Image (cartoon, rainbow, N blue to C red):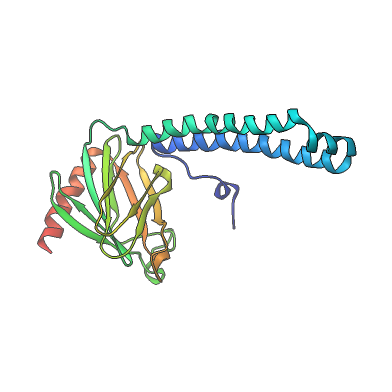
Amino acid sequence: MSTWAQFGLQDVASPFASELIHFHDFVLVIMTIILVIVVYSLICAVVNTNTNLHLLQGQVVETIWTIVPMFMLILIGYPSLQVLYTLEEVKEVHWTVKVIGHQWYWSYEFGDYYKFMFDSFMVPTNELEEGLPRLLEVDNRLVLPFHQIIRVLVSSSDVIHSWAVPSLGVKMDAVPGRINQLFTFITRPGIYYGQCSEICGANHSFMPIVLEAVSFNDFCSWCVACDSSFNED
């Protein structure tokens, strides 16, 4: 059964996602105002003949609907550039993780202080534990520390994929032969879900992303465990 919470955007867990939500709400207000004005003008043009002639032949009206959209674009473009600058303005990086897309699963590689790599496959429905979301849970979650600046390097081994986690406001294409990067800063612990956002083949909808944000100490403990277990394998 659907709830009202499912009709909105996901709860944000990073300042980047918060900026995107604010920009979305700002543009939505402008779009609503434009929609009301256009619908009102259409109704007046249909109902009132005098208004119809005024709208079709009025020099003042033609000047207004030429100049106003220009200022609307400037009004939208300025905060848009601010958001883009905020997403790329990162002076210090604490951790780097490399994400590689495959048909149809993800690989994660750490190489800063601990060197290990692991694959992350979707858990089949018949093996899913009670309470876990269907088609979204994976066997190996990506664990990252919150309150740390994370750089994510994204690439692909076969076709174009897209690594996207809506709660963090991040989405980056994974292109074969190319390494793209994005930055994120997680503000609170939790489990965040995402999916490949590029139509990459028959099993496109079966390569989810699960990111678990933990404290720095828990993250270091997880890295030590992964460093020993995955390297032994």
When the figure is inspected, residue 73 is found, relative to residue 175, above or below; the finding is above
Foreground: 80 or 214?
80
The image shows residue 74 at horizontal and vertical percentages of 53, 30
Foreground: 153 or 12?
153
When the figure is inspected, residue 117 is found, relative to residue 151, above or below; the finding is below
Instruction: Please report the residue visible at 11 percent of the width from the left and 59 percent of the height from the top.
Output: 231
Side of 51 relative to 120 (left or right) = right
Foreground: 41 or 143?
41
Residue 113: image quadrant is top left
Numbered label tally: 0
Foreground: 225 or 114?
114
The image shows residue 158 at horizontal and vertical percentages of 28, 65
Q: Which quadrant holds the C terminus?
A: bottom left
Side of 202 relative to 155 (left or right) = right
Instruction: Please report the residue visible at 55 percent of the width from the left and 50 percent of the height from the top.
Output: 6
Q: Which quadrant holds the N terminus?
A: bottom right
Instruction: Please report the residue visible at 52 percent of the width from the left and 38 percent of the height from the top.
Output: 24
The image shows residue 212 at horizontal and vertical percentages of 32, 48
Side of 96 relative to 123 (left or right) = left
Instruction: Please report the residue visible at 20 percent of the width from the left and 53 percent of the height from the top.
Output: 109
The image shows residue 98 at horizontal and vertical percentages of 23, 51
